[in-house]
Image (cartoon, rainbow, N blue to C red):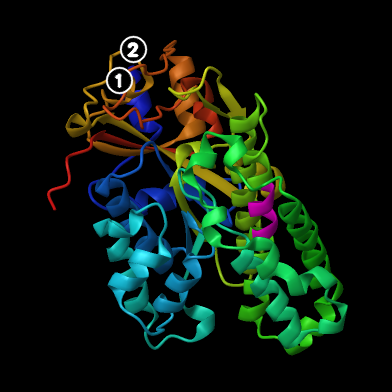
Amino acid sequence: MTIHAALSDAGWAFTDDAGPAMTRLLDELPSRPRLLGLGEPIHGEELFLQVRNRLLRHLVEHEGYRSIALESDCLAGLAVDAYVAGGPGTLDDVMAHGVSHGWGAFAGNRELVAWMREHNQGRPDGDRLRFYGFDAPTEMMYAASPRHALTEVRDHVTAWGDPGQLPDDAALIEEFAGGDDRWTDEAAAMDPSRSVGSSPEAVRLRLLADDLRALLLAQAPRLLAAAPEEDRWRARLHARAAAGLLRYHAVMAAASPSRYARLMITRDTMMAENLLAIEAREADRGPTLVFAHNAHLQREEGHWQADYLDQALTWWTAGAIAAAGLGERYAFVATAVGAMHHRGLGAPAADTFEGVLSTLPDDRHLLDGRRLAAALHAAGVEPVRRADNTDDHGYFPRDPAHVADSDGILFLRDVPADKG
């Protein structure tokens, strides 16, 4: 058997809709996952969003999926979920304020949210689609203030629990936090001395966040009997976010050689906590499609050599952490690409992983990661890691050494420029 035939036998070609191929891939797994991670190798390409949207429709219609989780602010995502449930507001407003990192402006994300709202019309709550952000409340150069998240938890206990058990510092959240701009100073991303994360007020808020999380657990029986499920979910989410944000700000304030690696670790740990909570919440409703960068969803350690750093960063990713807790209930499909000429990425060299996949007869394939790794090994083909990059250096190629760590490889030979 030729290497081309062996590669073709490791997966399935598709045109616009990867859904049927995904069902066949899921049939190959030992069990159906509860979280299905779909990664992208670079942000900002509409094609990835279009493939994701069509795939979600298939999974909803044929595999019982009832939610999607995006690499977006977990707290801001609550507004999107309320909107797709039929809540008030406009699509423009919810995309501007409910999807972080500026990704609300992408047509594919607008299409996703509009379709989810339309799909949910007339459906009972138990059958509606839910939208989640699972990222930390952070942007590229700053992290949010913990004030809002802490206040939400305090107000939840006040409304539904026993407020007499609130710590004394719960009355001082606004005083300790001060103005939100203290926390969102972009200069602190590069200069730890500009961060408020190690201030006495931040230390007290960090202790308070821990106390409030413990209080939610201590009062769980009372809250379960009194508070609506949605309110309890929001309180736990805000408690996780507050604790994570305060950890993140503390790391930002640390003048340590490991500072940037610890920031990556802290963010992905927050992501993983959210993913595990989503899986638990959705257990009785259906699986969840998770969409983010490959580097957050992969099972192996993350590695990054940033241009502005003199060290390589290594950390366990959100996907690796989630997989450690979920086992076969977590699956990961990585997206690999051939060329993106509009971003300066030409056709891959023949000896690279993407170059080998480019010899497949069709432009789009979904391949079983383990079968693909076995086919390459049987053929004596050892592809190398791709070394070229996009003009903005935002592209992360797949590591050929970890092909078998991906349940699937979604390969797109060419990524065209957005025509919109």
Is disc 1 in contact with disc 2, using a CB cutoff of under 8 Å?
A: yes
Q: Is residue 332 above or below residue 57?
A: above
Q: Quadrant of residue 86?
A: bottom left
Q: For the stretch drawn in magenta, what is the main secondary structure?
A: helix
- Report, in whole angstroms, how far the alpha carbon at label 1 lies from the one at label 2: 6 Å
Q: Secondary structure at mark 2?
A: loop
Queried whether the magenta region covers residue 124, the answer comes back as no
Q: Nearer the viewer, residue 247 or 205?
A: 205
Q: Residue 110: image x %, image y %?
A: 29, 64
Q: Secondary structure at mark 1?
A: helix
The segment highlighted magenta reads: 242-247
Q: Is residue 53 above or below residue 83?
A: above
Dot 2 alpha-carbon crowd within 10 angstroms: few under 14, some 14 to 19, many 20 or more: some
Q: Residue 72: image x %, image y %?
A: 46, 55
From the image, which quarter does the N terminus lie in?
A: top left
Circle 2 is placed at which residue position? Answer: 351
Q: Is residue 228 above or below residue 408?
A: below
The answer to whether any part of residue 292 appears in the image is: yes
The type of residue carrying mark 2 is Asp
Q: Residue 286: image x %, image y %?
A: 55, 67
| Circle on res. 355 | 1
Q: Nearer the viewer, residue 394 or 11?
A: 394
| Circle on res. 193 | none
Residue at 28% across / 71% down in the picture? 92
